[in-house]
Amino acid sequence: MALEIERLLDETGWQILHELQQNARLSFSELGQRVGLSAPAVTERVRRMEDAGIITGYRAEINTAKVGYPLTAIVRMSAQGDCRQLNTIVSTFPEVIESYRVTGGDSIIAKVIATSVTHLEDIIDRFLAHGSLTTSLVLSSPEKKKSIVNVDEVVQGDKH
C-alpha cells in the first residue's frame, strides 16, 4: 500500500491535491486541464486517491457567524478519568466542530461554536462536568486552512 501511495503522490498527484484543496467543486475536465491530464485520466487518479484513503471527503466551508454562531472558542480540557470516554462525550456536543486527543497537560482540544456568550457559558458548564478546562475566545483567524503541500519539494526548493 505504501508503494501505491508513493506512486499516487508524484508531482501530478500533489498538483491534483492542491487544486482540489483550493476548490473541490472543480469538474474533472477543468482539473485535468490544470494538471495536464485528460478528464478520464484525472478521474482515475482521483478515484485511486480516494480508494487509497488519501482523499477522505469533500466539504463545504461554512461562515458560522452567517448561520447564527458568531462566537468561536478553543476549549482545552484535562480528563479526570478515561480519555477515550471523554472523546465519546465530547463528540456528542453539537457545538464541537473539531476535536483532538492530544499529549501533554491537556487531554482534549476542541473548537466550539456558540450563538452567544450565554450559550458559550452553557457549553463550558457541560464540559466542566467531565474535567478541568481552559477556554479561549477566538477573536479572528488570520490564517485559514492551508493546502497540504509536498514538504520534500519545499525543503528541496530551499536548498537551491
Image (spheres, rainbow, N blue to C red):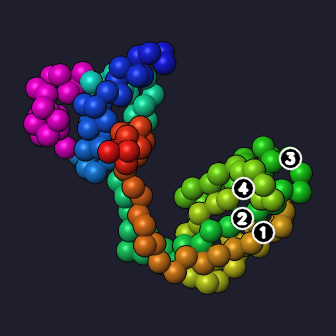
Check the image and report above or below for 101 versus 41: below
Instruction: Look at label 1 and name its amino acid.
Output: Leu
> Are the residues at dot 2 and dot 4 in contact (C-beta closer than 8 Å)?
yes
Q: Where is residue 157 in the image (x, y as percent from the top left)?
A: 33, 44
Residue 27 is at least partly visible in this image: no
**Location of mark 3 (residue):** 82
**Location of mark 1 (residue):** 133
Q: Position of residue 62 (x, y in %)?
A: 38, 62
Instruction: Look at label 3 and name its amino acid.
Output: Asp
**Location of mark 4 (residue):** 108
| Image quadrant in which you'd find residue 55 | top left
Question: Label 1, label 2: how many angstroms apart (C-alpha)?
Answer: 5 Å
Which element is circle 1 on?
A: strand
Q: Residue at x 26, y 36 (%)?
A: 16
Question: Label 1, label 4: how many angstroms apart (C-alpha)?
Answer: 9 Å
Which circle, 3 or 4, is nearer the viewer? 4
